[in-house]
Amino acid sequence: MDNAATTPVRPEVLDAMIPFMTHSFGNPSSLYDIAKISREAVAKARSQVAAALGAQPKEIYFTSGGTESDNWAIKGVCFANKNKGKHIITSPIEHHAVSHTCEWLEKQGFEVTYIPVDKYGLVNPDDVSAAIRDDTILITIMFANNEIGTIEPIAEIGKIARERGILFHTDAVQAVGHVPIDVVSMNIDMLSLSGHKFNGPKGTGALYIGKRVKLVPLMHGGDQERKRRAGTENVPGIVGLGLALELSVSEMKETTEHLKELRNRLIDGLLKVPKSHLNGHPQMRLSNNVNVIFEYIEGESILLMLNRKGIAASTGSACNSSSLEPSHVLTACGLPQEIVHGSLRLTIGDMTEEGDVDYLLEVVPEIVQKLRNMSPLTPQ
Amino acid sequence: MDNAATTPVRPEVLDAMIPFMTHSFGNPSSLYDIAKISREAVAKARSQVAAALGAQPKEIYFTSGGTESDNWAIKGVCFANKNKGKHIITSPIEHHAVSHTCEWLEKQGFEVTYIPVDKYGLVNPDDVSAAIRDDTILITIMFANNEIGTIEPIAEIGKIARERGILFHTDAVQAVGHVPIDVVSMNIDMLSLSGHKFNGPKGTGALYIGKRVKLVPLMHGGDQERKRRAGTENVPGIVGLGLALELSVSEMKETTEHLKELRNRLIDGLLKVPKSHLNGHPQMRLSNNVNVIFEYIEGESILLMLNRKGIAASTGSACNSSSLEPSHVLTACGLPQEIVHGSLRLTIGDMTEEGDVDYLLEVVPEIVQKLRNMSPLTPQ
Amino acid sequence: MDYSETVMDHFENPRNQGTIENPDGIGEEGNPQCGDIMKIYIKVDDNRISDVKFQTFGCGAAVASSSMATELIKGKTLEEAWELSNKAVAEALEGLPPQKMHCSVLAEDAIHKAINDYRVKQGLSPWEERAGKESHHH
Amino acid sequence: MDYSETVMDHFENPRNQGTIENPDGIGEEGNPQCGDIMKIYIKVDDNRISDVKFQTFGCGAAVASSSMATELIKGKTLEEAWELSNKAVAEALEGLPPQKMHCSVLAEDAIHKAINDYRVKQGLSPWEERAGKESHHH
Ligand SMILES: Cc1ncc(COP(=O)(O)O)c(C=O)c1O
Ligand SMILES: Cc1ncc(COP(=O)(O)O)c(C=O)c1O
Ligand code: FES
Ligand code: FES
């Protein structure tokens, strides 16, 4: 029930990777025959990723994950354009891979505008438009939020960015493989994705970089990836990412329908608990995401109880993070501090079954009751 | 015969990785039980790497490879210390992951001194000492060179750096698992390594960061790796790297003896070809590295011929690189342009056998003769 | 989060959870950073804590600390109870992760508040926190 | 480097490799960037290239281009041989990787130099390179 955090590698994906770990170990950038097999496998994966995004293969660059893709896109554009301008537009609900990168750039002299979101976590494209300045060099708004599942109006933001001639990056780590994406019609200039979010391997990712984008490498070194991303290619990882994405996209329609059914059932059931609320947008949300607040109780203790019942989940509570800061996402949605702590995120996957949902609907209300009995906040 | 480029994953390493790809897919930074298995496996790998370097586990940070480790160490220290100074000392024979990083930093206002090397590719520690300025913030000199195999006087350089209070980074990608290393007695502050150079997985690496080192993250984002290197941990990769390194170190003595024997036989045999010369230091060199120049002929064509005979190798020739620049390493060793183009690097591994060496000693002289017949440079 | 089995036991089976009607002292303490809140109720007989209950809104470590701390002061004199440090609570729990030590401080502080609440109600002057004591605001 | 089978064939079995004793024209061309050198020897009878040989120090593409180019101009008139473009050589080789196109330019240039060497020796004025022609110095 924590499929948004990470997913296991699919068996057929693992099978495709193994030969590149044990046998065809040539370095795809070198001359010899054995390397040719690797080279062709990487080219195939590049086409698979391109096809999933409506991009050209040569616009796909493999990275070590969503974090690297986000860091590269944002720092890369900023360092390449610092003579043009120093203003970045983003949202307050980005993943830390984006938000901490922006914060670091602020220390380097860049300026960042955070477009507020509404109570569902939605960015208003008009606000983006209004925030554009003469020295704006980048807009970075996530495709779908990892905590509350809200899907942002990416095509509208892309249109504005393109019309105003500003580069548009989107962190689509939670969306790729789950939501239809077309970088051309959506006017996306750069898009980050991460392999382990769609049953591909961990430590793999990609950045789509549209042809018109100039950016500085994050990884300087060898000539790999058209001299833009150095480092010996992780061939098995790349092969696994490509295949996993192709499979996810081909099964997307079916999977989505199945997940939506389970998700809605889960939401409806959980909201029967008194003093509970749904976080995120009721319709414009990822089909795998459920995020509910239970008043008067604290998130980490819900997780611990669920863990004892064999269920993995996630929370926006500060007590569960080493920084002691509560979820910046829920806070940005306007939730008061006392309530932010009681959120529960359950993210389902293709392996989730009806029985799992039923089990959850049985145990969660019991846990909530138990914790409410213990809480000094619960009204008598 | 190109083991310095990349090595296959050992079967026992692969076996250790697979469960973390298919089953225990918890995210080691989260709460639930399934994640505990991952967390403990990562901790074990961290201890394995630390033990191999004489470091503390908490000084080991996992990355996506040697390139990331080099970029992080160098950019990280420079951005963290830019108010203290802007001078970097390095050598002209570094891997591009170091040299291109330094070149980029030069564009950002840092200044770089390249300590010249002698004809064997050796850095003289006295030259390093003499190059230190009041505003020197970093010395970065590789442990062992990837082209010519020369092993640098790291302990001597480390001593100087420590005495002068300057941080010392070494790119030990070619040395780790092949040469004994002790970061404490060698006074190394930061050390880069890459998993696939010692039969670990590609797309994995680590950076040792001594306790006294302050550096800016290269990957901003989540709280992983003690908040210094964000990104979902590549658990299977980390597990594989740790085990592969432990195995390499435990077998090092034996392997080295075996390799040295084969290497010396190969060198002696190749040098029987007239007008051939050894590149790199005759004694202070990696036990797996052979690098020979054949006058009057060009490297890529040697590789192609070898390839047709089923042998993978490498060259410093420009014709084999997409940049058309000949090896900066051989050039730095003072080799004239005409000669730089005829180098052949053969790197052996644990799987190399005597028969392989004999076969090489049979085919290489034939190939050299054939190409010399074709060359306008060969004296009549 | 790696909690010891003792922490998990006290979390799942909290001792002394609940309230006391007409308590002799109440102490409430909150951590503004993590938002957690702990409330301790005591009954005092003959300068001894004859009964103690807690209510906690907080993480696993906070709940376990409340449970363990109340166990440790039950039946003790007020002076003995005052001496209970957060470290002793954490030790009794077989350790807490470093970033969770503040949760045990919450328990120490809430007990102190409850004791002083009792003292003030009795017309006594409140005891002072010893200097250099660990804070739960880190 | 992915070379076509035709490139590999001409690389491994180079046609017209060697020198001509007392040639009518010699052309030598080098690429200062990659360091490669190509030398073309021609024998001319009746304004036709009756024999041609090459020597090459260079990459696989350079060797294959020399071999193919000499095949293509053998028996041709000097005018026809002059018209041979590097693109035609590359096409005859079933393509060259983009960064290897300059190797075929080397062949075109060496042939032009050999032809002009012949013309000058005959007391004729050298032909001029057409404008906008691809350079091997990129
Ligand atoms: C929205 C979003 N962006 C970025 C990331 C970072 O991806 P990774 O951990 O694979 O580097 C994640 C996942 O953790 C995410 O959910
Ligand atoms: C000396 C040296 N440094 C750095 C690297 C880069 O390592 P990787 O390709 O694993 O990123 C290599 C290998 O290519 C190397 O040999
Ligand atoms: S009480 Fe704050 S995290 Fe435990
Ligand atoms: S002739 Fe220069 S690379 Fe081929």
Image: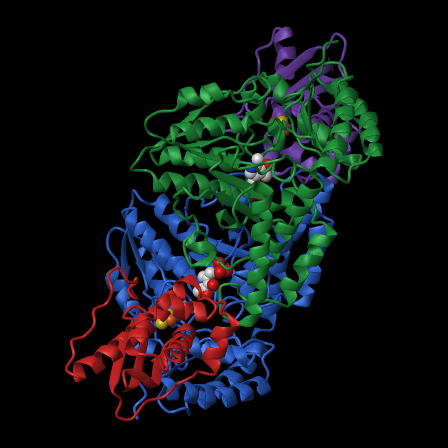
Chain colours: A blue, B green, C red, D purple
Q: Is residue A233 above or below residue D28?
A: below
Q: A173 or A84: nearer the eye?
A: A173
Quadrant placement of the C terminus of chain A: bottom left
- Identify the residue shown where x is 43% and y is 44%: B211
**Residue A327: percent from the left, percent from the top?**
36, 69
Q: Quadrant of residue A28?
A: top right
Q: A186 or A127: nearer the eye?
A: A127
Using the rendered image of the protein, determine whether residue A334 is visible from the camera's viewpoint.
Answer: no
**Residue B38: percent from the left, percent from the top?**
58, 63
**Residue B140: percent from the left, percent from the top?**
47, 32
- Identify the residue shown where x is 45% and y is 41%: B73
Q: Is residue B279 above or below residue C34?
A: above
Q: A159 or A320: nearer the eye?
A: A320
> In screen coordinates, is A159 left or right of B27?
left
Q: Is residue B319 above or below residue A218?
A: above
> In screen coordinates, is A54 left or right of B13?
left
Using the rendered image of the protein, determine whether residue A379 is visible from the camera's viewpoint.
Answer: yes
- Identify the residue shown where x is 75% and y is 9%: B380
**Residue C121: percent from the left, percent from the top?**
17, 84
Q: D46 or B288: nearer the eye?
A: B288
Residue ranking furthest to the front: C46
Quarter of image, ligand 4: top right
